[in-house]
Amino acid sequence: MRVTATTGAPADTSADTLVVGVFDGEGIAHDVERGALGALVEAGEARSAFKHVAVAHAAERRWLVIGLGARDRFDAERARVAAAVAHARAGELRARSLCWELPHHVGDEVAAGLVEGTVLGAYRFDRYRAAAEDGDAAEVGELVVSAHHDVRGPVEEAALVAEAQNRARDLVNTPPNDLTPQALGEHARALAAEVDGVTCEVHGAGFLADRRMGAFAAVAQGSPLEPAAIVMRSHPGSAETPVLGLVGKAVTFDSGGLNLKPGARMHEMKFDMSGGAAVIEAVGAIARMGLAVAVVAVVGATENVVSGRAVRPGDIVTAANGVTIEVNNTDAEGRLVLADCLVLARELGAERLVDIATLTGGIVTALGSVYAGLMADDDAWAAAVQAAAAASGELVWRMPLHADYADMLKGRYAEIANIAEPRGKASAVVAAEFLHRFTGGVPWAHLDIAGVASDTKRPYAKSGGTGFGVRLLVELARQIGP
């Protein structure tokens, strides 16, 4: 989608459909000939109720009047929702180009929200469908944001980040027979080749052996497909900020291993690489935006499948930092992959760590599809992640860490186990405490996105992969930058 900004009036653009919002107790700021839009409000056909849409034709143009609700409640997230609703209605009306009039007296974050809601709402994953007949095709190909002041900066950046999030969604939605671990690595390589300042290396099983990454290798050994340890760097010429380490789980298909998952929803386990997809696309967006933050990213990509070579319950493996781990449940595999990736990120110079993963069903039980779980061992770093989450609209809720949770992972035969018994108790926090063992004192935050990585029902991300984390990680890089 082509996205631009203008200080001209909406009617002066070439858009075939113009969108005007109305707040509770307020009228139409700039009406058209004979007050057609205001008349629509007066008649009750257009209302200020949030998300209500009315259609009018005036001055030889099509107009959408959308309710924005109470002004004091209207923020960037409600802008995203309103924009997605308006885009959907515009598509029903066969619109090809759309112009939003930025509401008066709002911040630039609202302009960015309108762009994100539109671009994300326009997302479709139809790679495996027959091409639609011309008569059925309907796609809004252009968005213009009209404002009294120049909003080109926030509009362009919002479009860039939203497109990165949509690319992450493509990765998440691609079936595992096509998006293998090495295919994900090739995608990262291609991105690095396109974006100045980004480098990428993709390593296989030999690298895991050489680096003694026995936890990651244990998960990978059951699959005939080569694993991929993807290392990306974004390195601006001079960055005086701490090196930001991003670590993503990318289990491209998770059967649960020998502790096999129930079959009913196993097809959804292609989503288990959502964290890795978010990291890869966030690195690209950070570099494209020219943010002066040095980033090192490590994505652990593998399948977790059943075979005669698969890791067994009861096996003991050794992680890259020398910690021995009892594998008491092969469906707690993501933490094994992340453990070695966290160690690698530290060895590559990360001075602040964020890992992001679809890690536990427990976080879904606790927080549903509204918040991701946040666990962190440094209050200042946790606050930075929470601030980035609030600004990006990708919400997190901080959960506790405590030595008693870590004690639940003490191994019977090895130093630690990969799962506590009974399994259901505090599973999301216990999983975080497992990862904590591998952070080496570097300020660290863990994002469990199992509940928000797919099918959130938000108007701009209703079904399939959401690309959660791209906006948050980019905003975090922006906020810690100089």
Image (cartoon, rainbow, N blue to C red):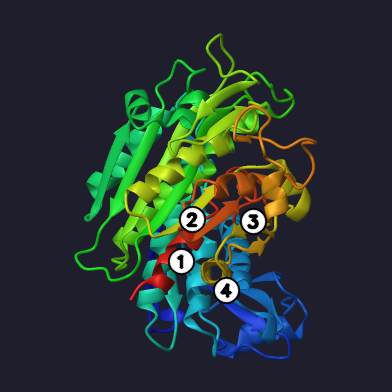
Please name which of the two marks, 2 or 3, marks the residue nearer to the observer. 2
Between 69 and 279, the one lying in front of the other is 279
Q: Residue at 41%, 71% (x, y): give it.
A: 480
Relative horizontal placement of residue 269, taking residue 95 as reference (left or right)? right
Sequence order check, earlier mark of 2 and 1: 2
User: In terms of image quadrants, where is residue 418?
Assistant: top right
Q: Are marks 2 and 1 in contact (CB under 8 Å)?
A: yes
Please tell me how crowded label 3 is: few (under 14), some (14-19), or many (20+) other residues with Cα within 10 Å: many
**Residue indicated by mark 3:** 372
Q: Secondary structure at mark 1?
A: helix
Please name which of the two marks, 3 or 4, marks the residue nearer to the observer. 3
On residue 263, the disc is none
**Residue indicated by mark 1:** 476
Type of amino acid under label 2: Val
**Residue indicated by mark 4:** 76
Report the Cα–Cα distance between label 2 and label 3.
Answer: 13 Å
**Residue indicated by mark 2:** 354
Please tell me how crowded label 4 is: few (under 14), some (14-19), or many (20+) other residues with Cα within 10 Å: many
Please name which of the two marks, 1 or 4, marks the residue nearer to the observer. 1
- Tell me if I can see residue 292 in this picture: yes
Between 360 and 339, the one lying in front of the other is 339
Where residue 84 sits: x, y (%)?
59, 62
Report the Cα–Cα distance between label 1 and label 4.
Answer: 17 Å
Please tell me how crowded label 1 is: few (under 14), some (14-19), or many (20+) other residues with Cα within 10 Å: many
Q: Are marks 3 and 1 in contact (CB under 8 Å)?
A: no
Type of amino acid under label 4: Ala
User: In terms of image quadrants, where is residue 150?
Assistant: bottom left
Q: Quadrant of the C terminus?
A: bottom left
Q: Residue at 76%, 48% (x, y): give it.
A: 426
Report the Cα–Cα distance between label 3 and label 4.
Answer: 19 Å
Relative horizontal placement of residue 211, taking residue 475 as reference (left or right)? left
**As drawn, 246 above or below 153:** above
